[in-house]
Image (cartoon, rainbow, N blue to C red):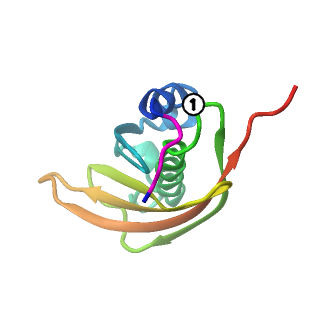
Amino acid sequence: MLKTFNPEFRDTVKEKLQRQFYMHLLGFEIETIEIGLVEGQLQLEEKHKQHKGFAHGGVIATLADIVMGFAAVTLVPADQHVVTADLKVSYLNPGVGTALFAKGWVLKQGKRLNFCEAEIFTIDGQGEKTLIAKASATMATLAPQAS
């Protein structure tokens, strides 16, 4: 069972999201923040696509990294930070659709490491989802620096 050490985890995540400048540049929006779970969506634009018109693998990896990282943030004290120590992405289908939906969760919580997973889906014009990538990551918890 996952345990948060921050009863105000949603506010902490929202505050930290304000400083996620690359996420904002892409246009990714977080929609769900729960203990150990974060979901969000990106409206696909030409700037998100590679030369064949599919969602770029780097965009997909970035979304996976964001949702897994912030899923881990929901579990740590507000004065601690989470960084990616390891990231693996498996691409299953081409990213063709009107939007990307990313869901990340903490599989196993630890004192210093959180083992996370994510799924990335495309959404077509009728709202149907297709799984295009699965990811896993190790998220390291950084304690506050002593002065």
Q: Which residue is mark 1?
A: 21
Few, some or many residues within 10 Å of mark 1 (<14, 14–19, 20+): few
Q: Relative to residue 60, is residue 124 drawn left or right?
A: left
Q: In the rendered view, tell whether residue 25 sits above or below residue 138.
A: above
Q: Viewer-proximal residue, 45 or 35?
A: 35
Which quadrant would the C terminus be assigned to in this image? top right
**Residue most extreme to the left:** 126
* 146 left or right, relative to 114: right
Residue 35 placed where, x, y %? 40, 46
Q: Is residue 80 left or right of residue 88?
A: right
**In this picture, is 118 found above or below 79?**
below
Image position of 53 (left or right of 122) = right
Q: Which residues are magenta?
A: 2-6
Q: Tell me how many marks there are.
A: 1
Main secondary structure of the magenta stretch: loop
The residue under the point 72% across, 44% down is: 142
Tell me which residue sits at (49%, 52%) in the image. Answer: 59
For the N terminus, the image quarter is bottom left
Question: Any magenta on residue 4?
Answer: yes
Q: Quadrant of residue 134?
A: bottom left
Q: What secondary structure is marked by label 1?
A: helix
Q: Residue at x 75, y 34 (%)?
A: 144
Q: Position of residue 60 (x, y in %)?
A: 47, 56
For residue 23: magenta? Answer: no
Residue 139 sits above or below residue 22 on the image: below
Q: Position of residue 90 (x, y in %)?
A: 49, 72
Three-letter code for the amino acid on which mark 1 is drawn: Phe
The location of residue 141, given as percent across then percent down, is 67, 48
